[in-house]
């Protein structure tokens, strides 16, 4: 994971969770994401799309900031993906108590709930 140029502390967190070698999509996109480019990443399930941006966000986030302004906005199409992404952020965050995540999703038919 060293070739993705994460901080040393975050690289050790990733290794604890079994991330030892980056996936192809991560090798092709991480430097562009780190450089501030907006990307649309597509690929099959399991190729590493979600992990790619979760890793980059967690490596760059400033936990010391005390303001209430959002730092990142990630849009996904349904409740299941919101839950998956929030779970991944919490699992990979070395300082999860300092991380505030708000997962929003649309309730399509209120009569079903």
Image (cartoon, grey):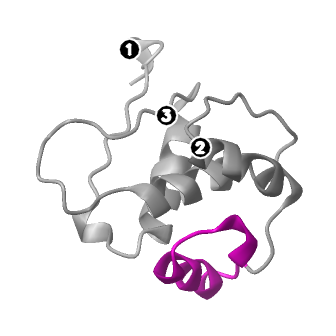
> What percent of the width, then of the height, locates residue 47?
84, 52
Q: Is residue 43 part of the magenta span, yes or no?
A: no
Q: Decide whether the magenta segment is chiefly helix, strand or loop.
A: helix
The residue at which mark 2 appears reads as 35
Q: Is residue 46 visible?
A: no
Q: Which residue is at a point 42% across and 63% down the rendered structure image?
A: 90
Residue on which the image places disc 3? 74
Q: Which of the 4 image quadrants contains residue 68? A: top left
Q: Quadrant of residue 41?
A: top right
Q: On the picture, is 28 further left or further right than 73?
A: right
Q: Tell me which label, 3 or 1, sits earlier in the chain.
A: 3
Magenta residues (range): 1-19
For the residues marked 3 and 2, what is the alpha-carbon distance in whole angstroms? 18 Å
Q: Position of residue 7 (x, y in %)?
A: 51, 74
Q: From the viewer's perspective, is the residue at label 1 or at label 2 nearer?
A: 2
Q: Which residue is mark 1?
A: 110
Q: Quadrant of the C terminus?
A: top left
């Amino acid at each position: 994971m060293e070739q993705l140029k994460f901080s040393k502390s975050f690289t050790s967190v990733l290794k604890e969770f079994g991330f030892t070698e980056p996936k192809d999509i991560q090798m092709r996109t991480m430097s562009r994401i780190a450089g501030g480019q907006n990307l649309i990443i597509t690929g099959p399930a399991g190729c590493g799309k979600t992990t790619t941006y979760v890793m980059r966000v967690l490596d760059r986030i400033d936990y010391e900031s005390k303001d209430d302004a959002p730092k990142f906005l990630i849009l996904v199409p349904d409740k299941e993906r919101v839950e998956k992404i929030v779970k991944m952020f919490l699992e990979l965050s070395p300082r999860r108590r300092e991380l505030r995540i708000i997962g929003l999703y649309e309730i399509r038919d209120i009569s079903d709930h």
